[in-house]
Each structure stands twice: as C-alpha cells, then as structure tokens.
Image (cartoon, rainbow, N blue to C red):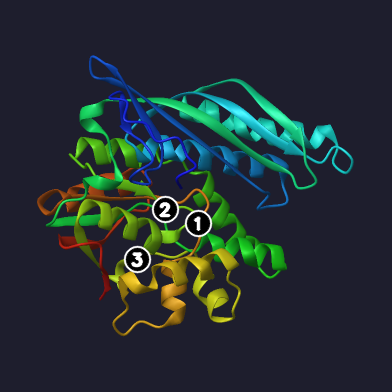
Amino acid sequence: MSFLNENENAEILVGLETGDDAGVWDLGDGRAIVSTVDFITPLVNDARTWGRIAAANSVSDVYAMGGKPLFALNLVAWNNDELPTELLSEVLLGGSDIAAQAGMAIIGGHSISDPEPKYGMAVTGEVNPDQMLTNTGLKPGQDLILTKPLGIGVITTAIKAGVASEEVIEQAIDSMVQLNDVASRVAVAAGATGATDVTGFGLLGHLGKMAAVSGVDTVLHVGEIYFISGAREFASDGVVPDGTRRNLSWITDQVDAGSYGEVDLLLLADAQTSGGLVFGVDKDKSADVCAELVAENVSAAIIGETLTGDGKISLR
C-alpha cells in the first residue's frame, strides 16, 4: 500500500505498519487519541437493528485497542430514490442507541446518495499508551481468550437466503449488538497487551496477522471455540459468504489444520460483523479472566495458547 501516507512522526504510536484496528496518536502526559472508521451494508431487515449493529461494529475497534470511545460522526450512504427518509431516521436511532450505551456523543456526520445503503461511524476515543492493546502485543506462553461465538457471516448469509430461523437470527443479532466494552476493560485490567477484534478477516485471519507481527505461534483448541447455533449446519450445506472463502484462501499457508476439514476451517475463517475480542493473558490469570467475563454476561472461553514462533496457527 505505497499509495498511503507513511509518516515517521513521533506522535504516531500505532499507524499503518502492523494492521491494527485503529490509529493511535500520542497527546503526552499518559494520554493518546484512538481513531477509527467503519461502515457496513444492511445485514437484517429491521432498520433500527441494522443501525445498532453498524454502530457496535464501528466502536469495537476502540475497545480492541483498550480505549474508551468519546465521540462519533455518522457516515451514511442512502438511496434517496428508493428508500424513505423515515427509514434512515430509524437507522440513525439505532446508532444513537449504541452511542448512549457506550457513553459517547454523536457530534456530526456526512451523507451521500448511493444506490446501495451503507451506515457506520468514524469514532474517536482515548487510551492510556501504557495500557494499549495492539496486534504486536502477544507474548509466548499466554492463553488466548475469545469473547463472542463465531459464525456471524454464515448466519447473515443464511438470513439473506431466507433459510435462517427467527431463533437463529435473534441469537446472531444479540451477539452483534453486544459491545466489547466489558471484554476490553477486563483484558486491560488483567495486563493483556495483545488483542484484536474478530471482524472481516475471521478468527484465523486476524489471529494470523497478530501472531506474525507479535513473533509468536498459536495453537487453537477447536473444541473449545463456541459457534452461533446453526452455523455449522449452514456451512455444511454450503451457505457460506464469499468473503469467508477468500479469508481461508488467504490464510491457508499459515495454518496447520491437523485432522480438521473444510467446514471447520471455513467457520474459523468466517467473516464476522461486530465480533468479539481475542486477546492473550498470562496462564495463571486466564481462568479468573474468563470467570469474570462470564459473570458479566460475556461469552468468553480459553481457545488456545501462544508459543515462540513466527505466526503459524496449529489446530488441535
């Protein structure tokens, strides 16, 4: 990406090089600004629910860096010829719901006319530079904790195909609108330094990037990983987004699949929207961290561990 502006400014604590979830700018005196942006096309039929999902997805990158969101700008692409403005109002109300839950203000935004509607946010937050969670922060000998089930991409594809039940849809929505604020707070308090949220590149893609730039290998205990109800059945039937298949193709050379087959690999590479965090903690803390997260209604599990290495992922 040589066309991007590369800058060696000393205030840039996190920039382009490591593929982190957000940029971080040092303000001095133990304070830094976190900046991120994201937007998505509709995943569900209800406009307000889509707004909530998009907003939760956008603010997640701040939590993935160990930060606290401060304010956001709405980003809207809207088909003015086909869609009523009242429907857009519902989308924006969904964004406001999440902003209120996250304790951040919405202070403006921008909209354009577009045949395909899109919604998201540019979010600004604050982080203590000494407590940042970054892609480069994994260390050998840690346990890996995942804070949401996988399979969202498969389920949203099933929704578009009209084959997902209301129960499955509800579970997927509940996962996508859940903020990663608690997961971030607990990770930071436990001394975690390496973390990412699991979004478009799937668990394998995001973890593979983080492992490579951290200089560790990872072992995933596949049997400990939770999946949204119905995800495995849909994946077995071929109901899989194209992005998930691209993810798997991109990361395959980095993965030792062991005895696991294509369906397992597709689920682990599934492109998520508003997924959970994956982070490393010292082994003597991991059980307590998981217990604390579960007590606060976060679906946390120890899914693997880190070893000295260069980015390889082994499935066990």
Crowd band around label 2 with a 10 angstrom C-alpha radius: few (<14), some (14–19), many (20+): many
Q: Position of residue 65 (x, y in %)?
A: 34, 37
Q: Is residue 98 visible?
A: no
CA separation, marks 3 and 2? 13 Å
Q: Amino acid at mark 1?
A: Gln
Q: Secondary structure at mark 2?
A: loop
Q: Secondary structure at mark 1?
A: loop
The residue lying furthest to the top in this view is 29
CA separation, marks 3 and 1? 15 Å
Residue 16 quadrant? top left
Which residue is the site of mark 2?
198
Instruction: Please name whichever residue, 197 or 94, is drawn nearer the observer in this view of the structure.
Output: 197
- Nearest to N terminus: mark 3 or mark 1: 3
- Please say if the residues under marks 3 and 1 sit with CB atoms less than 8 Å apart: no
Is 99 placed above or below 284 here?
above
Q: Position of residue 229 (x, y in %)?
A: 50, 67
Which residue is the site of mark 1?
272
Is 71 placed above or below 304 here?
above
Q: Position of residue 301 (x, y in %)?
A: 30, 58
Q: Which mark is residue 40?
A: none
x 82%, y 33%: residue: 86
Q: Position of residue 80 (x, y in %)?
A: 85, 37
Give the quarter of the figure containing the C terminus: bottom left
- Nearest to N terminus: mark 1 or mark 2: 2
302 displayed left or right of 154 = left
Circle 3 or circle 1, nearest the eye? 1
- Please say if the residues under marks 1 and 2 sit with CB atoms less than 8 Å apart: yes
Q: Amino acid at mark 3?
A: Ile
x 46%, y 78%: residue: 263
169 displayed left or right of 128 = right
Which residue is the site of mark 3?
225
Circle 3 or circle 2, nearest the eye? 2
